[in-house]
Image: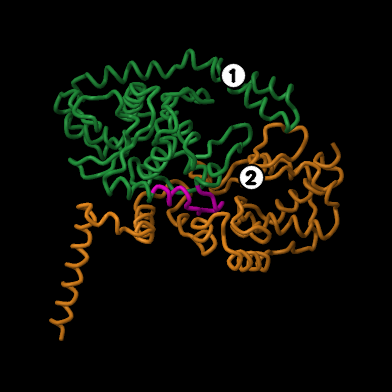
């Protein structure tokens, strides 16, 4: 019995080896499937990185959303999109004291800062929001990116209502709530920004006194 | 000095073009500044040193690199850069310029590849690699990318690179594709090439190695990719690892026929 199992295992190993040889020799090149390349890519990702500073290799671990967004990008099918968006909205943690608006001046500092979570950052350093890297926000700051939409005059256009406040909060906490596979990070879900910091950014966008709306 | 010129230029552009509709004009201002700088690209200093290093007897074996095969036959440098990464029969690996140089340094000169790979950028033998890649890439300046894809390993590395490019992960859900998957985007004032399309891939991939004004250093492609991963909040890509080679395969093949190599270029 044991011997038979072992023989079976050997036969499988030989077959696998043959398949590998065929692949190497190029004779099987036309039969390599997309799924084979997926497997090879996963193996290469796992073997190519090492930890450095505060960054461990577990950063490469993907959740279901990352896997699907890597594979389908913005052409995600409707079923997955709706499921991801509903799940994202359901896990948003709302402010513990029910207050959405902080200090816009602090929000501006967080929006300007691109610090945090790279292997050259320290573990205890406060993370920035990196907002200006992708968004136009105030009139004064002309060094802004264009990966995301302009947020200049956001509060003036959308109003500083509780509905807008909740929308902006959830969008920062987990932007997949409204747009699955967005380029925007999940700032709350992944602990990039804390509740207090998110409150300040909501104020930057919605407070009528913020330069986003006042200038 | 050059930093301050740049700052002044950006500031001047900023004053003139303070509205988003005129962002193109800002980019144009920066492009003009780069053009002016390119006339005196300090990368030339690395190029000269690289040519000397190629012909210098070094390492435990006291040999030169003149018999190094970069894919066009032993010692042929002209035109090699625009065909890399490619498969090499002697190592049975797809190699980019830098991993290939490690092979040549080890086999011809007896300089251990592992140790060079572990050396931090800008130090020791890595400094020599910077000079060598500057000269070798310069010998293909103005040539179109023409990476071979006939070998199954070349096709495999291209396919892996494509998947690595689209791989989103880390604290920020970033992948290469986040910044380099669409036309006409910027981070702050920095234009981002859409590396999924030929002309931009040739422009982007084809400008590294490059002299960086902001740090006064010459960055190789390995170093460029390394810093991209750092900003993505990914872990540290091992020097010459398969993910780095696969990404270069993907970018280089995408650039095939679509544009000319300008490396070593000059960057902000």
Q: Position of residue B122 (x, y in %)?
A: 38, 29
Q: Which hue belongs to chain B? A: green
Q: Secondary structure at mark 1?
A: helix
- Give the SS element for disc 2: loop
Q: Decide whether residue B92 is among the magenta residues.
A: no
Q: How is the image coloured?
A: by chain
Q: Is the residue at mark 1 from the same chain as the one at mark 2?
A: no
Q: Nearer the viewer, mark 1 or mark 2?
A: 1
* Outermost residue toward the bottom in this view: A1
User: Residue B101 lies in what quarter of the image?
Assistant: top left
State the residue at coordinates (53%, 57%): A69
Viewer-nearest residue: B171 or A11? A11
Residue A42's x, y, as percent?
A: 38, 57
Magenta residues (range) = B161-175
Q: Does residue B29 sit above or below B221 in this rendering? A: above
Q: Nearer the viewer, residue A39 or A192?
A: A39
Please rate how many residues cluster around mark 2, counting C-alpha atoms within 10 Å: few if below 14, some from 14 to 19, many from 20. Answer: some
Q: Residue A193 location, x and y as percent?
A: 65, 52
- Residue B85: quadrant of the picture: top left
Question: Quadrant location of the N terminus of chain B?
Answer: top right
Residue at position x 27%, y 54% in the image: A29
Q: Which residue is mark 2?
A: A128
Chain on which label 2 sits = A
Residue A86 location, x and y as percent?
66, 68
The chain coloured orange carries which letter?
A
Q: Residue at x 55, y 20 (%)?
A: B34
Q: Which residue is mark 1?
A: B32
Q: Is residue B254 above or below residue B143?
A: below
The answer to if B172 sits in the magenta stretch is yes
């Amino acid at each position: 019995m044991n011997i038979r199992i072992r023989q079976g295992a050997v036969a499988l190993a030989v077959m696998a080896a043959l398949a590998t040889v065929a692949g190497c020799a190029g004779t099987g090149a036309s039969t390599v499937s997309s799924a084979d390349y997926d497997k090879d890519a996963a193996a290469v990702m796992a073997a190519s990185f090492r930890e450095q500073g505060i960054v461990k290799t577990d950063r490469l671990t993907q959740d279901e959303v990352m896997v699907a967004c890597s594979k389908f990008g913005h052409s995600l099918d409707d079923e997955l999109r709706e499921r991801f968006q509903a799940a994202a909205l359901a896990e948003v943690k709302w402010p513990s004291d029910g207050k959405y608006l902080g200090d816009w001046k602090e929000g501006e500092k967080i929006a300007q800062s691109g610090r945090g979570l790279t292997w050259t950052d320290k573990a205890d350093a406060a993370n920035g929001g990196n907002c200006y890297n992708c968004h136009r926000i105030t009139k004064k700051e002309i060094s802004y990116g264009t990966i995301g939409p302009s947020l200049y005059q956001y509060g003036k256009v959308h109003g500083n209502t509780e509905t807008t406040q909740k929308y902006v909060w959830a969008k920062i906490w987990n932007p997949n709530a409204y747009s699955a596979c967005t380029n925007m990070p999940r700032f709350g879900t992944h602990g990039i920004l804390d509740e207090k910091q998110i409150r300040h950014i909501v104020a930057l966008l919605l407070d009528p006194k913020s330069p986003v709306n006042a200038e | 000095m050059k930093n301050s010129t740049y700052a002044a230029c950006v500031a001047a552009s900023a004053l003139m073009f303070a509205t988003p509709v005129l962002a193109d004009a800002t980019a144009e201002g920066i492009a003009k500044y780069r053009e002016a700088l390119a006339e005196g690209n300090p990368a030339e200093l690395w190029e000269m040193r690289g040519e000397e290093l190629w012909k210098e007897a070094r390492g435990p074996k006291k040999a030169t690199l003149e018999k190094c095969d970069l894919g066009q036959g032993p010692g042929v440098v002209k035109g090699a850069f625009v065909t890399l990464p490619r498969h090499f029969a002697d190592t049975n690996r797809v190699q980019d310029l830098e991993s290939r140089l490690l092979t040549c340094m080890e086999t011809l000169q007896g300089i251990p590849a592992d140790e060079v790979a572990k050396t931090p950028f800008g130090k020791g033998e890595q400094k020599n690699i910077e000079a060598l890649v500057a000269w070798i890439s310069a010998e293909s300046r103005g040539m179109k990318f023409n990476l071979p894809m006939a070998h199954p390993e070349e096709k495999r590395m291209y396919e892996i690179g494509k998947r690595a490019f689209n791989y989103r992960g880390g604290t920020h859900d970033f992948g290469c594709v986040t910044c380099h998957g669409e036309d006409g985007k910027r981070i702050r004032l920095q234009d981002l090439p859409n590396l999924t399309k030929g002309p931009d891939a040739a422009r982007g991939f084809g400008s590294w190695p490059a002299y960086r004004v902001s740090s006064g250093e010459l960055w190789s492609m390995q170093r460029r990719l390394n810093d991209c991963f750092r900003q993505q909040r990914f872990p540290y890509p091992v020097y010459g690892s398969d993910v780095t080679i696969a990404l270069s395969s993907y970018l280089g093949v995408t650039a095939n026929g679509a544009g000319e190599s300008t490396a070593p270029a000059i960057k902000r």
